[in-house]
Image: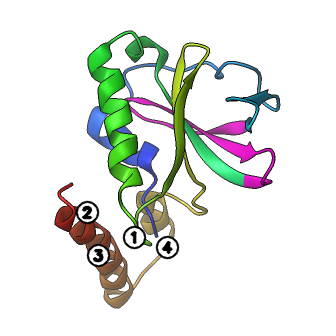
Amino acid sequence: MEVMVADLETKVFGSSYGEMSSPQGEIGKPILEGKYEILEKLGQGGMGTVYLGRHIHLERDVAIKFLAPQLEQDPQFRERFFHEAKTLAALDHPNIVKILDMGFEKDRYFFVMERVQGKALDEYLASHSLSIEEKLRILMEVAKGLEYAHEKGV
């Protein structure tokens, strides 16, 4: 049970930055150097919006995170956005989402992550009646990912 990055950011940063319009190009049309297409919006956090995308040539679903337009003008936020991508890209653990690509195109900053299926952890817990043992198992998986990240200096 991985917690979606967008869900975590909403909890940490809040959602006061407002709705983001669709990234450059329209949903369903090739963007990002012609490698990806945007299929639908998955979620929104304080630093940006995450879309379900598809790598056109590899025919693989991905999650594409765009920096919120109002934050793109701030060099500090751009640096933080790319720092997040580089930091996650250096981690290799089954409980941490992998970063596959990053870049800048048509005034939009983005990074591409593996697509994680399922619900956000808070939604999953709210919709399932779990035993203490099951809750502890989930907590241990989260702790393993956090421990690994901590060992790597994150």
Q: Earlier in the sequence, mark 4 or mark 1?
A: 1
- The quadrant of the rendering that contains the C terminus is bottom left
Q: Secondary structure at mark 3?
A: helix
Q: Position of residue 81 (x, y in %)?
A: 37, 32
Q: Is residue 70 left or right of residue 37?
A: left
Please, what is the three-letter code of the amino acid marked with disc 2? Ala
Instruction: Answer whether labels 1 and 3 touch (C-beta < 8 Å).
Output: yes
Range drawn in magenta: 39-60
Q: Secondary structure at mark 1?
A: loop
Q: Is residue 14 visible?
A: no
Which residue was labeled with disc 3? 144
Describe the colour scheme in one phrase: rainbow
The residue mark sitting in front, 4 or 3, is: 3
How many neighbours does mark 3 have within 10 angstroms: few (below 14), some (14-19), or many (20 or more)?
A: some
- Labelled disc at residue 149: 2
How many neighbours does mark 4 have within 10 angstroms: few (below 14), some (14-19), or many (20 or more)?
A: few
- Labelled disc at residue 128: 4
